Image: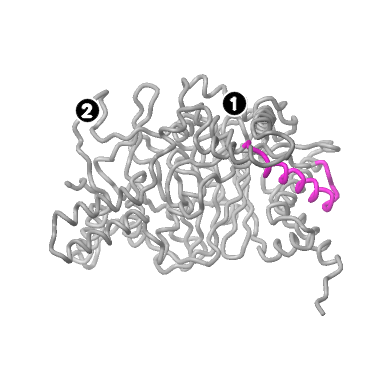
Amino acid sequence: MPTPAVSTPPSSRRSAKPKAAKAAKADTAAKVAKAAPRRSGTNGANGLPPGAEPMSKVDTAWLRLDTEANRMVIHGVLFLKPALALQPLRERVAERLLRFPRLRQRVVESGDAAYWVEDAEVDITRHVVAEPLARKRGRSLEGALQDRLAELAAEPLDPSRPLWQLHLIEHYDGSSALIARVHHCIADGIALIAVLLSITDGGAVPPEAAMASKAAAGADAKGKAKGAAKAQAAAVSESAEPEWLADALVKPINAWTVREIQQRALEGEPQASPAERLGRQVLEDAAALTDAPDDAKTRLKGKAGRAKRVAWGSPISLDAVKAVGKAMNVSVNDVLLSCVAGAIGLYLREHGDDTQGQEIRVLVPVNLRPIETAWQLGNRFGMVPLPLPVGIANPAKRLYAVHAQTQAVKQSLQPALSLGLMATSGTVEKAAQRAMLKTLSRKATALMTNVPGPTQALQLCGSAVERVMFWAPQPGDMSLGISILTYAGQVQFGLIADAGVCPDPERIVAHFDPEFQQLLTLALMLPWAHKD
């Protein structure tokens, strides 16, 4: 199969060893070419190149959600120590990331449909870029990085190329910071973290690529060239999960939803028939999604604008969070959600708002894929509106109120139904889809992600990955994005906010740790069980 034309990195300065520099460029080009096989570039039916792959309905929905106010781009930042140079990073990305077809493909829209098309030229210099960190007078280095992230969050990705980019800030207080930008139509947060972390030292290659290489190598050892090609194709076909979303999600409720509903129908009240339980559950959860009143009107609700603000705090110990959860007989998620509710409540009261008895809703993505298939790109999650009791100042009462809400969500079909709703929105006209999603966004104040990262510290090209953070985009007019991510025994809390609605998200972040410390103190005051 012919390989794509590849642009190699231009030299930023004259090299003392031109032959070595030329060899390095050639090596990078070879890795990119090897990783990114090219498809035929001649136009086919409907003006699309042969081999154009229809985008799934859910991914199409995320593609269409892009607006001037809220770009549907997932942002992440990795802190690396010691500092990382640009050339080794480009070589690693060429070798690892470009094995994933979605990261070699651009998006082409034709009528009401969207397609994945192999990019004719994989230009690594456009996807992995280095930049200095501009710093305003009086602004801290961390503040300058937050400002840069906020600027990037307002900028669209180049639609003529694959929808992802890495920005390397080589010099950041003796370290480096790597900003990742990937459009949500490519994948959800769970998949993106798995894929992006595959570029780390020792990171695994995509299972289908690994199996294909192994099959081809075995065939080559037997001296069967044709057999090797067949073995490689068979390995890819067998191991790659079928794109069931592209077909099953044409219906309002997808196949996963049907299976989930059927399973739930066999559970519950023994005196009721499965059909009765099924009907009651679907009606109740569908009503909860579509008929719920608009969310409480606080200063955090408002029409989103283009300018953003980003903030994060110091990480807290995951073991400490687990200890609180065990002592209070709740989950780790309950503890973290309670801290978020407490931090937002304090912020509102600081600004003079009366939060007595008030709740706000956050949309919480719920993963609907097996964790062992996290590397597979695409969007396979549902979203549920979760009430946060921001009006409860007592930390213990607030914790158990959150626990009650999360337990109700666990027994709900709302994640599956919301995935079906996203699929449906991907099949209708853009105007109708915008109206559907705008209605949904009115029912919540924020989108909150809680993503489990690697349990062990990682390295990238010999540099330690000290901290990792990710933010998901907010659909519609939602003005607040809340991110919780665990990595190497630490919990990281961060926010991305609309500058006009919440110009000081660092104030919310500042309240998160004190809220957790209150719960930790309460847990330590409880009687300890003694073993004989």
Q: Where's the C terminus, which quadrant?
A: bottom right
In the picture as drawn, the residue positioned furthest to the bottom comes out as: 532
| Residue at the (17%, 62%) spot, across then down | 220
**Is 468 positioned to the left or the right of 235 in the image?**
right
Residue 480 in sight in this render: no
**Mark 2, residue position:** 44
Q: Looking at the picture, tell me which residue is in the foreground, 143 or 331.
A: 331
Q: Is residue 408 magenta?
A: yes
**Mark 1, residue position:** 438
Residue 488, image quadrant: bottom right
Q: Nearer the viewer, mark 2 or mark 1?
A: 2
**Is 365 positioned to the left or the right of 152 in the image?**
right
Q: Looking at the picture, tell me which residue is in the foreground, 405 or 221.
A: 221
Kind of residue at disc 1: Lys
Q: Residue 468's spot in the image, x, y percent?
A: 54, 57
| Residue at the (17%, 47%) spot, across then down | 1
Local secondary structure at mark 2: loop
Q: Residue 273's spot in the image, x, y percent?
A: 68, 33
**Is 191 positioned to the left or the right of 321 in the image?**
left
Local secondary structure at mark 1: helix
**Is 205 positioned to the left or the right of 383 in the image?**
left
Q: Which residues are magenta?
A: 391-414
